[in-house]
Image (tube, rainbow, N blue to C red):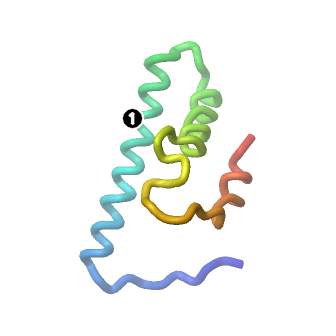
Amino acid sequence: MKSPRIPVADPVVTERMKVAFDLCEAAEEMMRLSIRRRHPELGEAEVEERIVRWYQHRPGAELGDAPGRPTHRLDHLIERSTP
């Protein structure tokens, strides 16, 4: 079941979320470039596979980026993207 979209009325929250998503995209592109630089022999599919693995296992942030209890509520999304 798809979650309903809840509009965000606060423009500050909207802008912060945009910045967070932009930073995420920039980090992914930097990692992609780093992989290609270190392993020029890899094809596009192999680079993408390494990106997926990077998202799944992040040294120093195995339980997430913030303190608190680990959650597994999004595990089903990761399982679908695993080859």
- Disc 1 target residue: 30
Residue 21, by quadrant, is bottom left
Q: Amino acid at mark 1?
A: Met
Q: Could you tell me which secondary element the residue under label 1 belongs to?
A: helix
> Most extreme residue toward the left, as rendered?
12
In the image, taking residue 19 as reference, residue 46 lies left or right, namely right
Relative vertical location of residue 9 with respect to residue 67 in this rendering, above or below: below
- Residue nearest the observer in this picture, 69 or 51: 69
x, y (%) of residue 24?
40, 50
Q: Residue at x 60, y 64 (%)?
A: 71
Is residue 11 shown above or below 27?
A: below
Which one is nearer the viewer's eye here, 63 or 37?
63
Give the residue drawn at x 42%, y 28%: 33
Q: Give the residue at x 57% y 13%.
A: 41
Count of labels in the image = 1
Instruction: Estimate the x, y position of residue 14 in percent, counting from the top left.
Output: 32, 73
- Picture quadrant where residue 20 is located: bottom left
Q: Please determine whether, in this image, residue 21 is positioned above or below residue 73.
A: above
> To which quarter of the image does residue 8 belong?
bottom left
Residue occupying the point 25% across, 75% down: 12
| Residue lying furthest top | 41
Q: Is residue 49 left or right of residue 62?
A: right
Query: Residue 64: horizontal and vertical position, in percent?
Result: 50, 54
Rendered-image quadrant of the N terminus: bottom right
**Horizontal and vertical percent for residue 78?**
66, 53
Q: Is residue 73 left or right of residue 25?
A: right
